Image (cartoon, coloured by chain):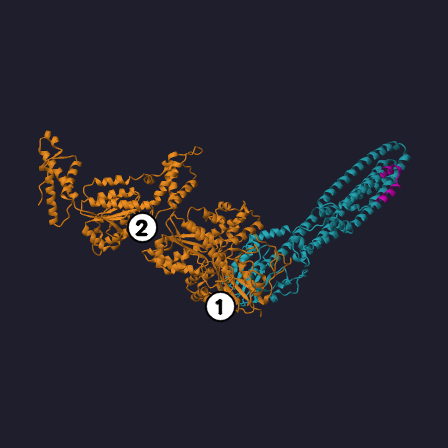
Amino acid sequence: MSGRKRIYVDEGEWNRLRQQARRLAELNRDLPRLVEQVRDQTQRDIETSLGEVAARHARFEEAVGRLSDRTREVEQQTARRLRATTRRLREEITAEAERQRADTARALRAQQETLTSALAEERAARERQFAEVGRGLDALRADQDRAARAVRDYLADAEVLREQVLQFPHERYLPGRLAPLDARLATVRHNVAQGLAAHSLTGAQEVCQSFSELRLELERLDQEWRACRIAAERELVALQGLVEQNRTLDPRARFEADTADEAPGVDHWSRGALSRLSAEIDAQLARVRDDAEPLPTEALLRVVRDLAPEFEQRLEAVVAQAVTAVQASQLRTNLAELIADALDEHHQYEVSDAGYQGADQRAAFLAKTVHHASGSEIVIEVEPGPDDQPPTVRLHNFDTDASEDERAARTRSIRATVFEHSGLSITAEEEAEQADAAMRDITPIIEPRAPQVPTRQPTRATRSS
Amino acid sequence: MTAHPAEPRFPSPMAVPHRLTGARRPRPGEPLWIVHGPGVDDEVVGEDLRVRDVEELLWEVLHAAGYQRIVFSAYRQPVYFRDARSRELTRSGGRAAAPRRPRAMRRFAGPLGDRMLVSAPARPAERPAATASDPSRLQMLDALMAQHDVPTAVVVPNAETLVHNIQPDMRRPFAEMVGRWTAGRSGAGNVCVLLFSQPEFADVVQFVRDQRYLPRFADRLAALGAQRGGPAVGRLGLPDEDELSRLVHAVRLRHRLRIADWTALDHLTRVMAAQEFGVRTWRAALRRMAEPLSVAALRRMELVQVDVPDTSDLWRRLDAMVGMGAVKDFLAVHRHVLRAGAALRERGLGAAAEPTALHLVFTGNPGTGKTVVARMVAEFYRDLGLLRRANVVEAGVEDLVSPYPGETARLTTAAVRRALDGVLFIDEAYRLTEDPSGQGQQAVDVLLTEMENHRDRLAVIIAGYPDRIADFLAANPGLASRFPQGNRLVFADFTPEELHEILLRQLDGLGLARTPELVAALRTITAALHRTRSADFGNARTMRELAAEIMREWARRTRPAPGGELAPATPEDIPEQYRPLLAEARPLEVVLSELDELVGLDQVKNTLREIAAVLELRKLQGGGAVVAPHMLFLGSPGTGKTTVARLMGRAFASLGLLYKGHVVVATRADLVGRYVGETAPKTRAKVLEALDGVLFIDEAYELAGRGHNDFGPEAVSELMTLMETHRGRLVVVAAGYPEAMDRFLRDNDGLHSRFTEQLHFTDYTVGELRSIFLSMMAARGYEVEPTVPARAVRWLEADRDRMARERRAFGNARTVRNLVDGVERRLATRLLRLPEEQRLTGSRLIRAQDVPDPVT
């Protein structure tokens, strides 16, 4: 007597089905919508950021007006060239929204190089100008008064340029660079105050030039940082969009299933993994956007380069987990169906009740079949296998008068039917002599339970016909 | 409560082919419907040109008969359905099972709804094993049959598999279940349809009986088979021409089969029907047929094993046959008789009369076309719609009778079954009752029963020699009544002209050109063959053999090479054994003149001349066949009987009464055996040796019985039979002492009447003995001294007297020969005593002392 039969599903064919499911697990990716979303959500930040840069330029140009003639000419040209660089940067950032992440990282590197080389050129051009100015100064040295006047002009210019430097979060970009310059400026001032103005011409000019260079350096780093932050923000926003796009699985597209029911939710089928991932992305985005404690350029770059791809991989895994779970659940009903087919067609057992354990589609599927002529009952139980393993199938036989031959014949027809319609090979072995009486009435088992995890999925038992 | 199928809707649905005979649907009130026959595993083609398997056919019949639930139960699949409604009615509350849809579940739903993610593998599934145990199967069948609310039919295909393989402990419940059904304890109107593949219902009954555990069921089946009114047993045979024609059209329409010749379609389906394959086989063959369909194409596919001549010109072919005027007339009349009967029955007239019997008797010698005509009769019956197929099964006694007990019935039944729907042709049917084992009578009895059982499906033609057939029928009145006088047809021997024509046609058929000389020579030969023919003359068969032999001789002589000149056949190509027929016999006068050279025998000579004259006269008159007479030669030994017999043989040959005229001398030892069964063959062998000549039986009275264990009378009886059989081809001369012969013939009356001529050979006179002595001496080249003849006569007289005293027969010429031999020996002894130089001169002269003294 075998009251309970355990049926093993051959792993080979099962694995083939699972591989099929993995192929179905690709991320849903609606790129145009994603681009739109990213643009919507980051455009204001870009505007703000670039507005800040523009305002700073305006202030700088206004400050240039207060410079001495000598310095003004050099700084005016720099200001003009900077404006052109900024404009190019802005264009590039706008275009970037449509780029892929890999391209973004590459573009950022290209931007940095462009900026660096533009500023290097700038610096070379100014050094030439400063050298020319310096040659003019040699003639001044003989003239004490004119020399002292020039020194005072330089000091005033240095003061103006220092103000411009202070416009930047210079301690974040180039920590400790301002203090030595301030010290040198104080030294030059002190010498001038000591009446050594005519002799301080070289030092004044150098201090002024150093402030100018520091400002230029800061300008470059600031532009870099802004570009990186925008890129990082964009990546995370795009990931948020991707998470949203993959919150449910379209049964028609993925499984060619024609069901009127609500699409399966990825979070439900991944048992909350999607929510956890989404929260992490949100937190990261908040950090990127945090102006009070802005992330350094390197950290932003890491977001773009490493963190975002990692998040996306995790998202893929979560979706795959959900797809395979849905498929496995469906396969459990399929298997139960084929077994019920065999019992119905060859042995006249009809299904009287069926459903998922606790009305949870992620759990075991149970179906009760009844032989009306004899009153015998067989409960089919299809339990999810651990990990990706085939499900565990059990037949609980409540057939008092059936012979072992009859049961063997039933197993044969089940095996034949399942194989004929699915290609799945199964084997059966006795698991217990007596059927578990608790399994006879499946109604309490398949009743919905108070959900421990909030489920988004409605559960259905037998099809309503 | 649903209405029961009391009034079935009829006629039968389009699906039912004609080959379903007997009960074509369940009989109302009868819980069993048996369908058996080779067709139950086949497919059928309905009037609607649809090909169905038998289960579908039965479904339609049962459905049309009003059964709402039709359940099938096979060995491998205990319960299955061919329609959704029947299935629903079997489910609880008649709830419908959702129909199976591709890639969808019917019962359950998962996260993806009813989507079936698995699909059938491309590789074919293994054949499913039996899916239910017998208890479950029986429980189900019994439950279905017992239900009253739905008119139910349970169909069991391959019932023999189920009945045979049911597990031992379930046999009793099974028997009880069937008992309950047949006792009417099933749901009213429910029927169980059992399919058996046995061709004959009797075999089905036997099969069930052989299972041992179903005796009541076997009885029930036997009773069903015996019920004449309202049959409950249907037979599904093999497809007939109509159905095969529908199959051809079905395949043509669905699979674009091409037809080579539309006008030949009738013949084609006829050929197909004759092969006795099922629709399944034909359909597979037609579907894979690459070329247009024709008989030749089927032959190339090795599907034609039985040849069927094109019957479109049956009458033309009959007309084209040489001779057989009586046969042609008979068939023409027979056709009208059969048609008339059918026409009358159609109008409801003569319904009480037995329809004209199809069975025929053909009498005639071998080679007179009986088998050929039997085949034509089969076609002719088929064309008249009296038989479904035109097959002819030729059965000899060996095919019907076995020396082993019980085998004969089986053999005969099997032969009849093979011939069903066609003709059973039994050649030399009388040999059945001549069978020494006595089993033949059983074959006749079985044959009679089968003829009765299959009166619409079988025509029996018996054939053989006319007189023996007549005896056979006379001895079997039951059989005779099946072959009314009007159905007995005599096949006459062909005339010499017909034989000649047949022979020439045979040569034409072989493609052999011939010279006019050959034609003329063959005319002589056929005339001679006809003249010398015996009862077993092969007629057309002999002509066919002769033609083949001429062809052989011609080929050996001319050695034709491919592409070379083909010389015509000439008289040179006539085979050796036929040449004597060409040789002109020596004229009678020459033969008779030899008679004159014999010494004495005046009475014999006169009688012989008279006989010859009478025979020649009769020949001249041309009134009927002239046959050389059997003769008695009565006389003592040495009176010239053998010599005369030889002369007489030649004389009869000259008269054209015997074709060889040779003499075979036989004595008792040549004819009578020492063991049982040895005698007749010995006698037959001698007679065959003497055929077309003279069988000279010396001292024939020795054949008379010598007590209980003597086979002499058997030889006499066999001899008489053979004399009759080979009448005209054999002259038997019985020779012996007059008194002994007289006693012998008195005891054998039949023999006496057959010897119409007697020749008395009297003893030689002294003068004749003297002449004989002298002529013998002369013949050996001796001269005699003048005193020698007188001494010899004295010796011979003394011997004769001594013999008479001792009541022994005097040897006549034989004694003279002995004397001559003795004289010769004495001469030799005398010469040896002479000096050598005198020996030669005296060696040819017989002196008086050479003749021995008389013995007293």
Residue B364 pos. (x, y %) = 37, 51
* Residue linked to disc 1: B181
Identify the residue at the far right of this view. A145
Q: In this view, does A132 lie to the left or right of B77?
A: right
Q: Is the magenta stretch mostly helix, strand or loop?
A: helix
Q: The cyan chain is which one?
A: A
Residue B190 pos. (x, y %) = 52, 67
B818 is within the stretch colored magenta: no
Identify the residue at the far top of this view. B837
Question: Callout 2: residue from which chain?
Answer: B
Nearer the N terminus, badge 1 or badge 2? Answer: 1
Q: The orange chain is which one?
A: B
State the residue in front, B754 or B171: B754
Q: Can residue A412 be seen in this view?
A: yes
Q: How far apart are marks 1 and 2 (CA)?
A: 64 Å
The tag on residue B725 is 2
State the residue in front, B827 or B116: B827
Q: Is residue B236 visible?
A: no
* Amino acid type, label 2: Thr
Residues in magenta, as a range: A56-76
State the residue in front, A236 or B305: B305
- Residue occupying the point 18% across, 41% down: B599
Under tag 2, what secondary structure?
A: helix
Residue B133 pos. (x, y %) = 49, 62
Q: Are marks 1 and 2 in contact (CB under 8 Å)?
A: no
A65 is within the stretch colored magenta: yes
For the C terminus of chain B, the quadrant is top left
- Residue occupying the point 88% across, 33% down: A140
